[in-house]
Image (tube, rainbow, N blue to C red):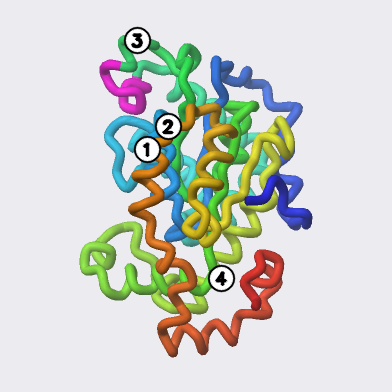
Amino acid sequence: MEHRSGFESRERACGVADPHLSIEPVRTLRPPIILVGMHRSGTSLLTAVLREFGLITGFSLNNEESAFFHRLNLYIERATGGRWDDPEPIVRAHADAHLLQHIVRHLKKEVTSPKIILYLGVRRFWRYRSLERVDQPWGWKDPRNTFTFDFWRQVFPHARVIHIYRHGVDVAASLRAREVNSRVQALSHYASTRCRTLSGAFGLWRAYVEKAFSLQPEDGERAIRHVRYEDFLASPEQTVRTLLDFCELPVRPDVLRRITARLKPMRAFAFRRDPELRAFYEEVRDDPWMIRLGYSD
C-alpha cells in the first residue's frame, strides 16, 4: 500500500480546489470515503470488505455502488460530454469555471435535499435527516469517481480517497471478456466498443491509473491511500487493518478471519495462465505505467 505515488501527472493541476468557486461546501461531521479505481480492478471487492466492518456505502446497492451517487456521477458525465470509457471530456470540463460552478451547485443541491434518503435508507434517514449529521464512517464506491472526484471535492472539501489498482493486462482481459461474452452488456448503454480489444481496454486502464495517482485531496497525502490489488489478495489482513485505521472503523477479528478465508490469491496475475494474454503482456510491459506500478517484471 502506498501513501503517495511519487510521480507527477499532466492532469495534476485539475486536483487543485478553485478558490473562485462561489458555492459554500457541505460541512459534515465525518468526511466521506470516496473509493476510486479502474473498472474490474477490485473496487467492488474492497468496498464489500469495508462495508462488513461498518462503512456506510449506500442504500439500494448494485455492484456495491450507491444508486444515489452513481446517478450523480452519470449527471456529471452527461453535463461534460464524457463517458466511463471516454473520460477526457470530464477532465477538460473542470477547467471551465462556469460549467464547474453549474455542476457543483447541482451536486450540492442534490446531496442536501430529502433525496438523500435514497442513499441513507429509511432507517438512517429518520435518524440523521441529512448527510451533515451522519456520525459514522460513510462514503461511496464508483470507478467514475476517479474522474469526477475533482467535482466532488468542491462539495466535500475534506473527502478522503481510497484507490485500488490492478495489473493492466488482467484488467484489459476482464473488460474485453465482459464486452465480448456478455449478451446483457452488449445491449446495455454502458457497452464499450473501445473495450472490445485488449489494446483499447489497456489504454483506458492507463488513463484511469494516471488520473487516480494525480488526485489531490484538500487534506493532502494523509487523505489518500493507494492499494495494490495483488497485495490485497496476498496479505489481506495487513491491508484491511491499515484501511480500517484510515476509515476510523473498528477492527473485528471474527470478520477479518472470515474475509481472509474467502479471498482467492490465485486471481492475481491471472494473465499468466493464458498464452494470448502473455503475448499481449510482452507488448505492453514497457509501458511507463506498467513500470511505475511494478508490473513490468
Magenta-highlighted stretch: main secondary structure?
helix
Q: Which of 255 and 150 is in front in this view?
A: 255
Q: How many residues crowd around disc 4 within 10 Å: few (fewer than 14), some, or many (20 or more)?
A: some
- Amino acid type shown at disc 4: Gly
Between label 3 and label 2, give the one nearer the viewer.
Answer: 2
Element on which disc 2 rests: loop
Residue 36 percent location from the top left of the image: 52, 47
- Tell me whether the residue at label 1 lies in contact with that at label 2, contact meaning CB atoms closer than 8 angstroms: yes
- Amino acid type shown at disc 2: Arg
Which quarter shows the C terminus?
bottom right
Vertical comparison of 106 with 165: above or below: above
Vertical comparison of 146 with 205: above or below: above
Q: Name the residue under label 4.
A: 203
Vertical comparison of 142 with 202: above or below: above
Q: Which of marks 3 and 2 is nearer the N terminus?
A: 3
Between label 1 and label 4, give the one nearer the viewer.
Answer: 1
Point out the stretch of residues depicted in magenta: 115-123
At 69% from the left and 26% from the top, the residue drawn is 21
Element on which disc 1 rests: helix
Q: Can residue 40 be seen in this view?
A: yes
At 42% from the left and 43% from the top, the residue drawn is 47
Q: Mark 1 points at which residue?
A: 255
Q: Mark 2 points at which residue?
A: 252
Q: Which of marks 3 and 1 is nearer the N terminus?
A: 3
Between label 2 and label 4, give the one nearer the viewer.
Answer: 2
